[in-house]
Image: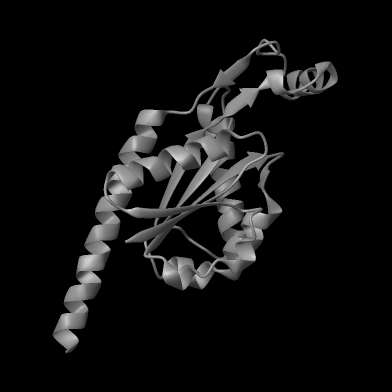
Amino acid sequence: MNILVLYGTSEGQTRKIAVFVADQLKARGLQVTLRNITDNANAIQLSSFDGAIIAARVHAGTYQRDVTSFVARNSHALADMPAAFLSVSMSAAALRPGDMERAEDYVDNFVRRTGWTPNRIVQVAGARLYTRHNAIGRWILGLVDRHMLDTHRDYEWTDWEQLKRFAEEFVTITLETRRHVQSVGESVD
């Protein structure tokens, strides 16, 4: 079974998450194709995959345009296979009241814009990587974060155990779907 893990990232945390999930799937015997949305996503033929996981980060309340466009173009194919959406955001870390509601709103808007309702949606807490920015960038991020964090260090809230459990569930669902499709095909013969 071949699973597509397609991700969009800006600072690398979503890539780190996608690689982790891909490794979990491989460890459970699945073949995995890991692709960054910027690596010629138009050439991806979903018909050659048995399932897909789309991972995207939230920035300023929206997902990357390339991810949104890919999903909108392929919403029907994604709907016809086991497919999950990993929404990566600081809001999923629930550092402030209302954060989880905001995280859910991001996904609701994504579903409306793309026409795709994933089989499984996972809210994944991301990271704030202040040290990758210069002093002005850290200052701006500090304003965005309402000065609640020390801008001289990085923070990672990703729950790796949650992602491990998700990968296990995805493998189970994908294998069950495949067995169901095979049994339907056998009964038609």
Residue at screen point 53% across, 43% down: 87
Q: Let me know if residue 101 appears in the view.
A: no
Which of the pair 149/54 is nearer the observer? 54
Quadrant of res 81: bottom left
Note whether 147 is above or below 113 in the view shown: above
Note whether 36 is above or below 147 in the view shown: below
Question: Which image quarter holds the N terminus?
Answer: bottom left
Query: Would you say 61 lies left or right of 13 here?
Result: right
Q: How many marks?
A: 0
Q: Let me know if residue 41 appears in the view.
A: yes
Which of the pair 166/123 is nearer the observer? 166
Query: Would you say 138 lies left or right of 150 here?
Result: right
Image location of residue 150, percent across then percent down: 67, 10
Quadrant of res 69: bottom right
Image location of residue 148, percent across then percent down: 66, 13
Task: Tell which residue pokes out farthest to the bottom in this image.
Answer: 189
Question: Which image quarter holds the C terminus?
Answer: bottom left
Residue at screen point 44% across, 43% down: 122
The colour scheme applied to this rendered structure is one colour
Quadrant of res 176: bottom left
Residue at screen point 43% across, 70% down: 48
Task: Tell which residue pokes out farthest to the right in this image.
Answer: 136
Image location of residue 21, percent across then percent down: 41, 42
Which of the pair 22/115 is nearer the observer? 22
Query: Would you say 5 lies left or right of 61 here?
Result: left
Note whether 145 is above or below 181 in the view shown: above
Note whether 123 is above or below 151 in the view shown: below
Query: Would you say 104 lies left or right of 28 here?
Result: right
Image location of residue 13, percent across then percent down: 57, 33
